[in-house]
Image: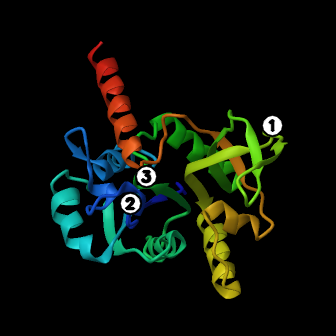
Amino acid sequence: MTKKTSAIITAAGHGRRMGESRKKQFLMLGEVPIIVHTLKTFQDSASINEIILVVPDDKIDYCKQEIVNSFKFTKVKKIVSGGDKRQESVFNGLKSISREIDLVVVHDGVRPFLSKPILENSIKKAKEKGSVVVAIPVKDTLMKISDQGMVIEGQNRDSIWRIQTPQVFKKEILISAFEKALKNNFCGTDESTLVTRLGIPVYVVNGSELNIKITTPEDILLGESILKAFSAQLLK
């Protein structure tokens, strides 16, 4: 039987670091909102069977009409309300996936430059290993800083990676991870944190420096540059 895959796209953040009254996932990047770029990657992937879009409660109608219907995202099967924290939002999405789903992809709605190869590689490896995150190794020097703002000592960066999304898991693993976190009143920063608490190994797929998370006004400027570079490549 062919395994079916659901993508949970988290776009329920408030964007306080963006300094905008409008939520960052709906800011324009090029000629369309950021979330449109993100959804297109999953809409166009043959590996994705359905998309669950998680947004602020007051944006559900807007997303249905102005995002999903306007841009013909036919794989978006449900638009659900997010929570105050990412973990709550993802769990709401997880509870909304179809019964026949085997694999769950979780991706930040404000990472609009996810490449198709990275998405496909992460899904392929998750089918083999069960739990996968996309990540890139740290390049910068790392320092431990005191409460007074002074350098204490350098840190070994050889085994330190920056975790991105997508993060991909077999459905039963992810459900168990969330159930344990709920039972223990534990809140993690991402899904891999919850899964490792089960004692289940999480494997890494190489990500990309271009797979940025748009969080600040500076990220918008960087995103526009990336978008122009992509457009220029397509015109060659």
The relative height of residue 39 versus residue 92 in the rendered view (above or below) is above
The residue singled out by tag 1 in the image is 158
Q: Position of residue 178 (x, y in %)?
A: 62, 76
Label 1–label 2 contact, CB within 8 A:
no
C-alpha separation, residue under disc 1 versus residue under disc 2: 36 Å
Q: Nearer the viewer, mark 3 or mark 2?
A: 3
Q: Position of residue 47 (x, y in %)?
A: 46, 47
Number of labels in the image equals 3
Which label is found at residue 53?
Answer: none
Q: Residue at x 19, y 67 (%)?
A: 62
C-alpha separation, residue under disc 3 versus residue under disc 2: 23 Å
Q: Position of residue 174 (x, y in %)?
A: 62, 68
Sequence-wise, the earlier of marks 3 and 2 is 2
Under mark 2, the amino acid is Ile
Q: Please indicate, yes or no, whether residue 224 appears anywhere in the rendered image.
A: yes
Categorize mark 2 by other alpha carbons within 10 Å: few (<14), some (14-19), many (20+): many
Sequence-wise, the earlier of marks 1 and 2 is 2
Relative to 13, 34 lies left or right:
left
Q: How is the image coloured?
A: rainbow
Viewer-proximal residue among 54 and 85: 85
Viewer-proximal residue among 77 and 157: 157
Under mark 1, the amino acid is Asp
Under mark 3, the amino acid is Thr
Label 3–label 2 contact, CB within 8 A:
no
Q: Residue at x 38, y 30 (%)?
A: 226
